[in-house]
Image (spheres, grey):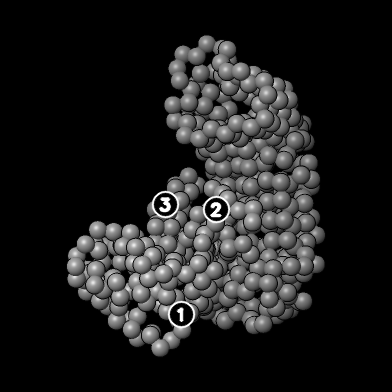
Amino acid sequence: MGTQKNFPLDLLCEEESLSLFEKRAGAVIKDDRIQRVANELAKKCGGLPILVVAVASGLRESSLEEWKDTLRRFKNFEEKGLTDIAFLIIELSYNRLHSEELKWLFLLCGIMLQSNYSCSLTDLLKYTIGLGLFKNVRTVEEARNALHSSVKKLKDSCLLLDGYDDGNVRMHDVVRDVAVRIASRDHHVLSRVRTELDQSPSKDCSLISLRRCTIPKLPDVPWECPELNFFYLGSSDNSLEIPCNFFEKMKELKVLDLTRLNFPSLPPSLQSLTNLQTLCLDQCVLGDIAPVGQLTNLKILSLLISKVKELPKEIGQLTRLQLLDLTGCTELVLIPAGVISSLTSLEDLRMGSFKEWERGLNDGRSNASVSELKQLRQLTALEIHIPDAKLLPANIGKQLKNLHVQNNDEVTAVIKSSHAFPNLESLSLDNLVNLETVCCGQLIAQPFQKLRSLTLWNLPKLIGRK
């Protein structure tokens, strides 16, 4: 099927159910009183592995009283179908999550799953930062660490699965259905996937996700959603037009993701979203995006794989921006001089498709210079494409923790100073056909003491250290 991992969904026999249940429940099952309850619970899971694992994992550290209460709940559902039992089991696992952060992340994953039941960790990072999901988190790196830690906990609870690669997570379709039902019931979430939009959101709606829905026309009278925090609109038809006043009554919006749409100009009401933290205009056709510069509270701006020719000078007003993602913007040819260096809070910059760098910091430049990156004191992650290796200034990477270098036939060595990247944690070298060595010259110290990840691809001349 072209997958890296397969998840068997065949029914288990009774013996297999009991064995899997005991394995996932852990040492607590050694208590004879609990084991008797466990045997009954395992039988009531109907041989479905997802249910066996969810129940056993959820009760790993529970008391005898909690085991008995769970069995009582099961017995109340005996006359109902397996679907209702599945909802009960997964909701019990959800209710046992130790924090509201985990619960909201679980619901967000369920709402944002794509057609292959996977969800991008990069998207989740952008959303969770915008929503302020993780408390006492100040930097992108801290948010990324919190996200990965929380994802692991959800996997341990069997509410999430490993993705097809390290950049994604998956969710069983039964678990997804439960997540959407809980979100709709408890948090007034409107979620639709590949269907017609059959209703307007309620006034107390907190999240809206419309993924590849059929929407002939959005209403001229704006939706009144004073409590809305999150809005995802991914149209199946990029000709969908957003009315000028559409966002006027969404003042509390923190995350806005408009995917696969055509914007000759942005809706004027976008400027009224003064609380917006994350704006994603991914896979869009973009004209004038200067109004984005008025959203001065933005922390995340993503134009992933969008057709945009110019990043306007007004973007330089986003002095609170922490992550700028221009990945795949292959038509981007102009970033006015001084825009990048104005983004003084930037920690994560992804612009591997931009090639029109100019040399130096002197006045009179019309386009961005790589030297501007030296002004970004908070920068810890960088992905850029530099067609001329001579444009790269010295000592640019002392604070970098993640570096991806690709598609250059002039680079023969990455590091010419032993202290060039003292804090680097991940290094990816991709399609550098003339790279002969990573480090050259006399090394007086170990330049990669903090390195945890190294990726090498298509380096035909790499021979080692000189």
- Dots 3 and 2: beta carbons under 8 Å? no
- Who's the residue at 44% across and 47% down the image? 145
Query: How many angstroms separate mark 1 from mark 2 (CA)?
Result: 26 Å
Task: Please name the residue that numbered disc 1 is placed on.
Answer: 82
Front position in the image: 280 or 157: 157
Q: Is residue 4 above or below residue 414?
A: below
Q: Indicate which label's residue lies in the foreground, 1 or 3.
A: 1
Question: What's the residue type where badge 3 is placed?
Answer: Ser
Q: Quadrant of the C terminus?
A: top right
The answer to whether 308 appears left or right of 44 in the picture is right
**How many numbered markers are drawn?**
3
Indicate which disc residue 5 carries.
2
Q: Is residue 232 visible?
A: yes
Residue shown at 19% from the left, 65% from the top: 31
Q: Looking at the image, is mark 3 or mark 2 earlier in the sequence?
A: 2
> Residue 113: which numbered mark, if any?
none
Q: Residue at x 22, y 69 (%)?
A: 34
User: Which residue is under mark 3?
Assistant: 149
- What is the x, y in percent for residue 458? 67, 30
Asked if 357 appears above or below 346 in the picture, the reply is above
Q: Amino acid at mark 2?
A: Lys
Q: For marks 1 and 3, give the CA distance.
A: 32 Å
Looking at the picture, which amino acid does disc 1 mark?
Leu
